[in-house]
Amino acid sequence: MNDEYLIVLKSILPEYFEAVIKAKAMVEDENRSVSEACKRYNISRSTYYKYKDKIFNASKNYGKKSIIGVKAGDKAGVLNAIITEIYDAGANIISINSAMPVKDVAFITIAMDVSDATIDTAQIIYKLKAIEHVKSASIISVE
């Protein structure tokens, strides 16, 4: 099991974590600038950018959809192996965007519904990293 992700009570975290979540919502939902959101929630822009893709607000429906990023070598069968691993985990792929490989490296973004998955997104990432020619895999967003 991958121990890279934790679920913790908000009360034990520094206050700026919640401020980053609120600022991120302001930027995404209200189309406000990052500077404006950071001023409103009294955090620095560097704090915002450091944590905005690393903390998520849990809700009742948290974890139903995930977007992941994969950097893989431009080799035959790698994308198929990635798709197969996601399918085997019980996740449903919503969309795949694969950029043209540059210097034999392809960047792939996958949106998936993990409601019926047999393992969580962190474990899917762990399994994807084990695929030959996959250079990195990470969670971009969780809804």
Image (cartoon, rainbow, N blue to C red):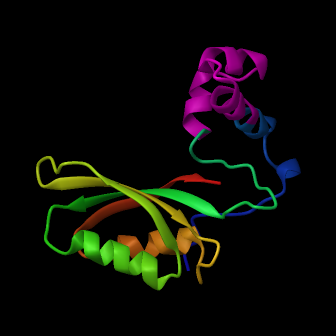
Is residue 91 placed above or below 103 in the rendered structure?
A: below
What quarter of the picture does the C terminus occupy?
bottom right
Residue at 59% across, 84% down: 118
Residue at 53% across, 81% down: 90
Q: Which is nearer the eye, 6 or 92? A: 92
Q: Position of residue 34 (x, y in %)?
A: 61, 21
Furthest-left residue in this view: 103
Residue at 62% across, 30% down: 47
Write down the region rendered in magenta.
22-51
Q: Is residue 129 left or right of residue 72?
A: right
Q: Quadrant of residue 72?
A: bottom left
Q: Quadrant of residue 33?
A: top right
Q: Is residue 127 left or right of residue 56?
A: left
Q: Total number of numbered labels? A: 0
Q: Position of residue 101 (x, y in %)?
A: 16, 51
Magenta region's main secondary structure?
helix
Furthest-front residue in this view: 94
Residue at 74% across, 49% down: 57
Q: Quadrant of residue 28?
A: top right
Furthest-right residue in this view: 11
Q: Is residue 53 left or right of residue 18?
A: left
Q: Which is nearer the eye, 76 or 97? A: 97
Is residue 50 placed above or below 9 in the rendered structure?
A: above
Q: Which is nearer the eye, 59 or 94? A: 94
What quarter of the picture does the N terminus occupy?
bottom right
Tell me if residue 2 is in the magenta stretch.
Answer: no
Tell me if residue 46 is in the magenta stretch.
Answer: yes
Q: Position of residue 82 (x, y in %)?
A: 34, 72
Q: Position of residue 98 (x, y in %)?
A: 28, 54
